[in-house]
Image: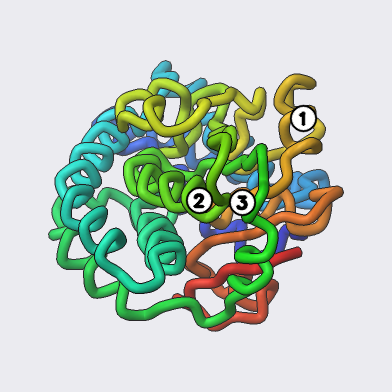
Amino acid sequence: MQVHLDCVHCNVRQALEAARLTTADTGIHKKIVFASLEALGKYDSYRTPAEMSRAVHDLVKQYSGNPDPYKKVKEDSIAMARGVYPRLKRLVEGDVDRLLRALEVSAAGNLLDAGVYGDLRTQDMEAVLMEELDRGFALSDLKALRGDLPGARNVLIVADNAGETVLDRILISEIKRACGSGTEPNVFYGVRSVPMINDATVEDAVASGLEHDAIIVDTGCGAPGLVLDDADPEFLEIYREADVVISKGQGNYETLSDSAGRTVYFVLKAKCEVVARDTGASLGDYVLLRR
């Protein structure tokens, strides 16, 4: 997906928010914001919004001296998700359409996005998530996914935010179930190589307990989206050879929607007008798209 002018003001907001997470020193805040404005002035050099965002958040790390500004936010979001996990798992297992319900739960977990919504720790996330589950998918290629999963031997999920990893455990269980009887499929879970906003790293996925459900793999990419040109060769082999690839969240959509090089299922909430227009959805819609 191409960069839009709307992405500029969004990144300035994120720069200041991240700066305030790292320090109370307004002098450092000022340095980060003005350095970010300079980086954003190179607008035409960024291929995707996620790569623009990486440039800004790298500056936050540089000027603050903090390699993981959202570490506490991620820890708290994982804890919040763990708190609602048992109820949501029971909800899925008691549903007549377990795969659809698991996808809806996984998509609702997309709300745990500090890059868009800021610090969510003051909200009642269980109430918010339960309300969101009633929305369903505005656009859905579920029928195609149902056709692709049976018999699949290797499935790759490209992760998004840290809190979401907890709820993705439920989806992974239902994917394995949908693949059919016989040998259990390999489900790979691709995470960021370094901390980037509140996106999931190996450390975050392990903290969620996900290593018991899937094979956690480092993508080699440190942007808030999967940039294939930056990915490790080992990960690229998994990506190319997988029977099914499921991409979570806006950042991965931004980087893969025009350059995936294969069929990908995108599961996300359209949290900005730019992504909404690109997917054909309305702002706030949940979508499951096969592209």
Give the residue at x 53% y 46%.
Answer: 181
Quarter of the image where one finds residue 140: bottom right
Mark 2 lies on a secondary structure that is helix
The colour scheme used here is rainbow
Q: Which amino acid lies under the numbered mark 3 shown in the image of this protein?
A: Ile
Q: Where is residue 74 in the image (x, y as percent from the top left)?
A: 31, 35
Disc 2 and disc 3: Cα gap in Å?
11 Å
Give the residue at x 52% y 35%.
Answer: 57
**Image mark for residue 175:** 2
Q: Is residue 69 left or right of residue 143?
A: left
**Image mark for residue 1:** none
| Mark 1, residue position | 236
Q: In this view, does 137 lie to the left or right of 179?
A: left
Q: Which amino acid lies under the numbered mark 2 shown in the image of this protein?
A: Ile
Quarter of the image where one finds residue 229: top right
* Camera-nearest label, 2 or 1: 2
Q: Which of marks 2 and 3 is nearer the N terminus?
A: 2
Q: Earlier in the sequence, mark 2 or mark 1?
A: 2
Q: Which of marks 3 and 1 is nearer the N terminus?
A: 1
**Image mark for residue 246:** 3
Q: Which of 265 and 175 is in front in this view?
A: 175
